[in-house]
Image (cartoon, rainbow, N blue to C red):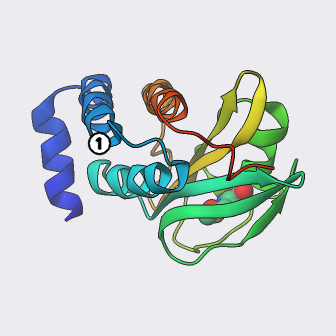
Amino acid sequence: MQVLTMAAEAADGTKSENYTMMQAQLAALFAGERDALANTANFAAFIFERLPDLNWVGFYFLRDRELVLGPFQGKVACVRIALGRGVCGTAAATRQIVVVPDVHEFPGHIACDAASRSEIVVPLLRDDRLIGVLDLDSPRPARFDADDATGLQSLTDLLLAMSDFDTLVR
Ligand code: SME
């Protein structure tokens, strides 16, 4: 499966071209549906299938000033993360994308799957309001770079524009 998706990515062109294509496919997937639970569930499944070398991808949503686990693909994960804790809590608190080439070097990293070696977390912001974070883990060291940060930001911007999060975030 991973070999097949890697070949697909290489055949499709550069990483950023692949993200542009994924953006169009996600827009088609979300068309006519604004339910954030449904769209984030499909988003996680789509990313897990389309990007190579991932062992976990999913969401944490801000609920009562804490991050709470949302739809994901991968092994079972910790349910609640305080703002400022771990990679997810850091991205949420700073409202910045956090790229971690080696999770063992990140102070306070929360290990949900021992296979994870690198990680990227993208905060979800709408109108300056924190909605939650998107978290991707890889068993490959330094799996994520600036192209992934830009590409994933464009995909989450699309998700935020095409979904209503009011019932998920409080
Ligand atoms: N590693 C994350 C915790 C979530 S899991 O990776 C699914 C962190 O340090 O915040």
> Is residue 129 or residue 135 the one in the foreground?
129
Give residue 122's position: percent from left, percent from top.
Answer: 61, 38
Q: Measuring 10% from the left and 36% from the top, which residue is drawn there?
A: 11
Residue extending furthest left?
A: 11
In the shown orientation, is residue 166 left or right of residue 159?
A: right
Q: Is residue 106 visible?
A: no
Give residue 119's position: percent from left, percent from top.
Answer: 57, 50
In the image, is the residue at mark 1 within 8 Å of ligand 1 by its beta carbon?
A: no
Q: Measuring 16% from the left and 37% from the top, which residue is drawn there?
A: 10
Q: Is residue 62 visible?
A: yes
Residue extending furthest front?
A: 32
Q: Is residue 102 above or below residue 14?
A: below
> Is residue 166 or residue 142 the one in the foreground?
166
In the shown orientation, is residue 119 left or right of residue 68?
A: left
The residue tagged with tag 1: helix, strand or loop? helix
Q: Pointer 1: what residue?
A: 29
Residue extending furthest bottom?
A: 76
Give residue 145's position: percent from left, percent from top.
Answer: 48, 32
Q: Is residue 19 above or below residue 121?
A: above
| Amino acid, disc 1 | Leu
Give residue 85's position: percent from left, percent from top.
Answer: 85, 54
Q: Measuring 13% from the left and 47% from the top, which residue is drawn there?
A: 7
Ligand 1 image position (quadrant): bottom right
Corner quadrant of residue 147:
top left
> Is residue 19 or residue 43 the one in the foreground?
43
Query: Callout 1: 10 Å neighbours few (<14), some, many (20+)?
Result: some
In the shown orientation, is residue 132 left or right of residue 86?
A: left
Q: Measuring 27% from the left and 49% from the top, which residue is drawn there?
A: 50
Corner quadrant of residue 80:
bottom right
